[in-house]
Amino acid sequence: MKNPFLTGKKIYLSPLTKEDITADYIHWLNDKEVCAGNSHATFPNNYMKTLSYVESVSNSTKDLVFAVRWKKNDLHIGNASFQDINLINRSAEMAIILGNKNYWNKGISTEILSLFIEYGFDTLNLHRITTGTPVTNKGAIRICEKNGMQKEGLLREVLFKNGKYLDVVIFSILSREYKALKNKIK
């Protein structure tokens, strides 16, 4: 494993570095299908833009970005991040991009979300974690619900993709809800 930080059953997360900037990674950020639920693939991405992003998050105290790697071969298959970490309110927004389509529909995003929620509450001492996804992304909605996140609201026509505006559903989980779920599983 390449510098594992969080480890799951199928995947592990390690800090995102400039060595992760490959042609495949840049391609994900330009792929309309991969980026159907986020703001990427709106403007063309290239090595320099990606390098600038990786360097900025490496030095950030408000963003934590991890490379998602497949355990069997260490392949970088996606990214997961906490964004806008607010240490006073103890809150953060979570985002996942699973760029390598060969790893779709294998339960990986569910595993990432579970690892991230645990890390956010048990290590970062967050009180609230949020995420958003277009209402058309039924898979992401199921993953949020499966991991105990509550539907909190709807941002109407906030994301412009493929010539139309999409509503985005907002999910959140609070530390007490996470602890209640954790105790229920025990």
Image: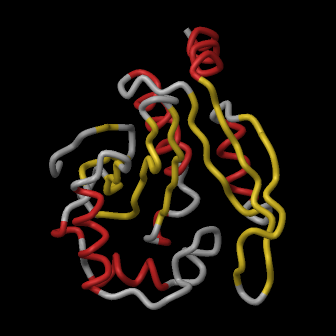
Residue plotted at (50% across, 33% down) = 117
Tell which residue pokes out farthest to the front in this image.
Answer: 88
Please identify the quadrant where the C terminus is shown: top right
Picture residue at 47% right of the left edge, 63% below the top: 103
Give coordinates of residue 111: x percent, y percent. 49, 42
Q: Position of residue 175 (x, y in %)?
A: 57, 21
- Relative height, residue 44 to residue 21 (above, below): below
Q: Residue at x 37, y 47 (%)?
A: 62
* Residue drawn where x is 31% and y is 38% of the image: 6
Which color scheme is applied?
secondary structure
Q: Position of residue 180 (x, y in %)?
A: 63, 12
Q: Is residue 133 above or below residue 93?
A: below
* Image position of 67 with respect to 150: above or below: below
Of residues 73 and 23, the one drawn nearer to the viewer in this rendering: 23
Task: Tell me: residue 120, above or below residue 68.
Answer: above
Q: Where residue 83 sits: x, y (%)? A: 45, 50
Residue 1 left/right relative to 114 = left
* Quarter of image, res 12: top left
Q: How many callouts does the rendering have? A: 0
